[in-house]
Amino acid sequence: MSFLDFHRPPLYPKQYAAIYDDKRISCIEASTKAGKTIGCIIWLLEQACTNGRAGWHYWWVGPVSEQASIAFRRMQAAIDRERFVAAQSHPQHIRLWNGATIWFKSGDKPNSLYGEDVQAAVVDEASRTKEESWIALRSTLTYTRGQVRCIGNVHGRKNWFYRLARRGEEGDPEIAYHKITAYDAAMAGVLDEKEIEDARHQMPEQDWRELFLAEPADDGGNPFGLDHIRKCIVDGMTSREPVVWGWDLAKRQDYTVGVALDRDGHLCRFERFQGMPWDEILRRIISSTGYCAALVDSTGVGDPIIDFLQKQPNTRFEGYHFTPTSKQKLMEGLAVAIQSRAVHYPDGPLRVELETFEYEFTRTGVRYSAPEGMHDDCVCALALAVMGKTTVPAPLNITEQVLRDVSAYRYR
């Protein structure tokens, strides 16, 4: 069989875009029965048929062996029986005519996944697969720089798949993110829309939204409430003038983020950048903020920064020092604003961070933060802007602004 002998079965547009994304890792949060499994069977088989050679390995990893066996049986049915040899022993595998082998493995025992070099892989039911199994699989792709497709239903927020998907959604250069809902599948003729609606009335709303809309349940670790976060989303930023800015400053690999709100609490300006020298960061903060009031994170490196900003003419910067107590106060204020619909924002990085943000009770109090490996800069900037609306000085009137602008030296 040559390269030209492989004929890819048709995939509907969203299914193809998710599975055949150019990025090395593609996280696909998808509805039940939306075609994610069969699509990835096609993808993995195509990788092994068109690129494989003797001694090369391709893996399908499920949370348990029974789950992996489903894909094994489906792949067997899809291949010309003269072109492969299937072994029913565990782990089950298919040896192709070109010498490449596709293995169907269980993630139930992570230590069994170490040691091999893998050319490409699929993690099935990723939200239910152990994180230790993902770590082991990822190590097998290091030498080959192989591609991997992580697929599954949404299953709460406290799992590695959810965190990895959010990194992709935030724009990680090596991680793609795709969502396929039941309605996407219905539009493609894969599911019956009546069946979707019947399921909605026959199961708990929270479970239905996870299984059919790929929307995570609020599992109690989010201080704002996932439903409240979604209800504050609007189509885009307003064009009104801001009345307050909130600025969260970069620390190590984090982002510097600026969020501006108009008088009605709608997001009207948004700045997010990283990897800049401090003089350029300061220039952008001053240029963006202008005359507007601003509340700025003054913790650690922010202490000398706020001193510098406050010395600039015609500016109205105030510092906010983060401690466990002050951060709790800040986040409680943001929670009230979100739950009372006093703040509105478009979909994007801000919504992603709000949904992943967590709190936990510790011996010393309540701890608010993003999960390990994720960012909370947008959340902090929004919280500072919300607090700033009630704590920063009232704006100058237009006459005072003009007089000060004419007489004062502006930072360049």
Image (tube, rainbow, N blue to C red):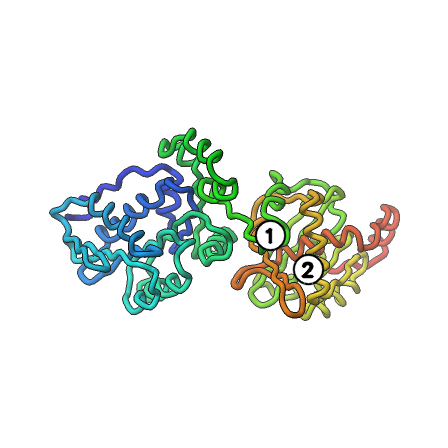
Q: Nearer the viewer, mark 2 or mark 1?
A: 1
Residue 333 position within the rendered picture, expressed as x and y whole percent measured from the top left: 72, 53
Q: Amino acid at mark 2?
A: Arg
Q: Amino acid at mark 1?
A: Leu
* N-term-proximal mark, 2 vs 1: 2
Q: Is residue 197 left or right of residue 333?
A: left
Q: Residue furthest left?
A: 82
Q: Residue furthest top?
A: 194
Is residue 268 among what the camera can see?
A: no
Q: Is residue 55 left or right of residue 33?
A: left
Residue 187 position within the rendered picture, expressed as x and y whole percent measured from the top left: 41, 31
Residue 138 position within the rendered picture, expressed as x and y whole percent measured from the top left: 37, 63
Q: Nearer the viewer, residue 345 or 333?
A: 333
Is residue 393 among what the camera can see?
A: yes
Q: Nearer the viewer, residue 385 or 80?
A: 80
Mark 1 neighbour class, 10 Å CA radius: few under 14, some 14 to 19, many 20 or more: many
Q: Residue sitting at 43 percent across and 37 percent down? A: 182
Q: Which residue is mark 2?
A: 283
Q: Secondary structure at mark 2?
A: helix
